[in-house]
Each structure stands twice: as structure tokens, then as C-alpha cells.
Image: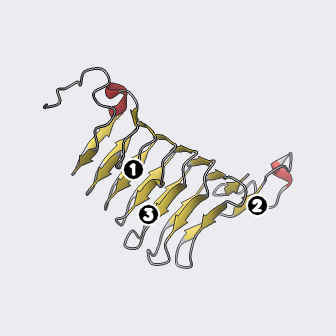
Amino acid sequence: MRPTWPPACGSHKRLPCRALNCLSLHLTKALGTLMDNNGPGFTIQNRGVLIGNRLLKVAGINVGPGSVVSENDIGDAPAAAITVRGPRCCVEENYIADSRMGIVVVAGAGEALIDGNQITGTASGVVIDEKPPGCFVVRNCVRGMSGTVAYTIPAGSSYGPIVAVAGVGDISQVAASTHPWANFSY
């Protein structure tokens, strides 16, 4: 059966989405929530823009070179919520909850900007492989499960101070918490 646009109610929930040179603005508002998919929610091959989508119980978002992933809500991803596999990507202002991993930048994905994301209930927050050089990580917040490694950022990348503020009360009393580029774990 060939899908129609817009799809009939409920027919979209298990469709994998793959795109090349695409722009997705609030695609799931037209479709509803993308959920219960065995494969990736969205795979962007090259220079895609993915903004304002909701993904639940899918293998997350996987993007190639020059892509933008912004303002998405991703929950219960069985692997990484967002995987960056190409250079010069921008991952900003996403909400990630209860996924195995938050944002993962793999080898070959240097010069990525990871900015202003909220990550909660994961085993790892922001993980950058040792090989991609020149990533920039600022203004993120990670609250994970017990034993979570909030940030794994190797030498060769730049980042704002990482400030642990779990249970401290007034965070302005914690060193570097007022830094404009601070990354928080709480």
C-alpha cells in the first residue's frame, strides 16, 4: 500500500523517515508523534534541517554532514537519541528524556556545535568520540541516572565549564555556574 499525504490517522507511526538535502519543520505536527519504530526516526544523509519534531520509542535522529537538529523532543530511544556522523553539524535546543544515550558525535563528525540541549534520564549525556576535532559544546544541561557520565569531551574540542550542581541549592554560589557558556550536570 502506498502512503498518502497526509497519511491516514495512525498509518504514519511505524514509517521510517530517510531524507537527503531536506528541510523538516514540525513534520510530526502534521503526522502526529513518530513512535514505536524499530529503525531510526529520521536519517539525514547530507545538509538536512530537522526542527520541531516529537519522537517516542524510536532509534532517534541520525544526521550527516552540515545538518541542523533543533527544538526536537525525543523520548525513550533505545540507543542514542541524536547521532552526529558528519562534520559541521549543529545540534541545539533539543529535549531528550529516558534514552540510553543523549547526543553522540562519532568519528568523522568534527566541528559540531552542541548548544543548549536538555538531557535527562540517560546513561550518558553528550559523548564526543576521540577522533572528531574541533567540536564546540556549550550551555547544555544533563541529568542522568545514577552513575551517568554527563559529558565525554576529548582534547581537541572546546567547551564551556562543566558545573556539577546536583542538590546544591542556589547554584550561583558554585564556581563557574554564572559563566555564560557553562554546561551543567544536575
Q: Position of residue 71 (x, y in %)?
A: 46, 40
Q: Position of residue 163 (x, y in %)?
A: 73, 60
Residue 61, labelled with which disc? 1
Q: Is residue 18 above or below residue 157?
A: above
Answer left or right for 172 relative to 67: right
Residue 176, labelled with which disc? 2
Which one is earlier in the sequence, the residue at label 2 or at label 3?
A: 3
Q: Quadrant of the N terminus?
A: top left
Callout 3, which amino acid? Ala
Q: Are marks 2 and 1 in contact (CB under 8 Å)?
A: no
> In the image, what residue occupies the spot 35% across and 49% down?
40
Helix, strand or loop status at disc 1: strand
Answer left or right for 173 relative to 56: right
Which one is closest to the eye, mark 2 or mark 3?
Answer: 3
Q: CA distance from mark 2 to mark 3?
A: 23 Å
Q: CA distance from mark 2 to mark 1?
A: 32 Å
> In the image, what residue occupies the spot 67% across and 57% down?
182
Task: Provide the residue designation for mark 3.
Answer: 112
Q: Are marks 2 and 3 in contact (CB under 8 Å)?
A: no
Which one is closest to the eye, mark 2 or mark 1?
Answer: 1
Q: Position of residue 33 (x, y in %)?
A: 40, 31
Helix, strand or loop status at disc 2: loop
Callout 1, which amino acid? Ile
Q: How many marks?
A: 3
Which one is earlier in the sequence, the residue at label 1 or at label 3?
A: 1
User: For the view shown, which residue lies furthest in the top direction?
Assistant: 9
Helix, strand or loop status at disc 3: loop
Q: In which image quadrant can residue 111 be found?
A: bottom left
Q: In which image quadrant can residue 184 be found?
A: bottom right
Q: Is residue 26 above or below residue 19?
A: above
Answer left or right for 64 relative to 73: left
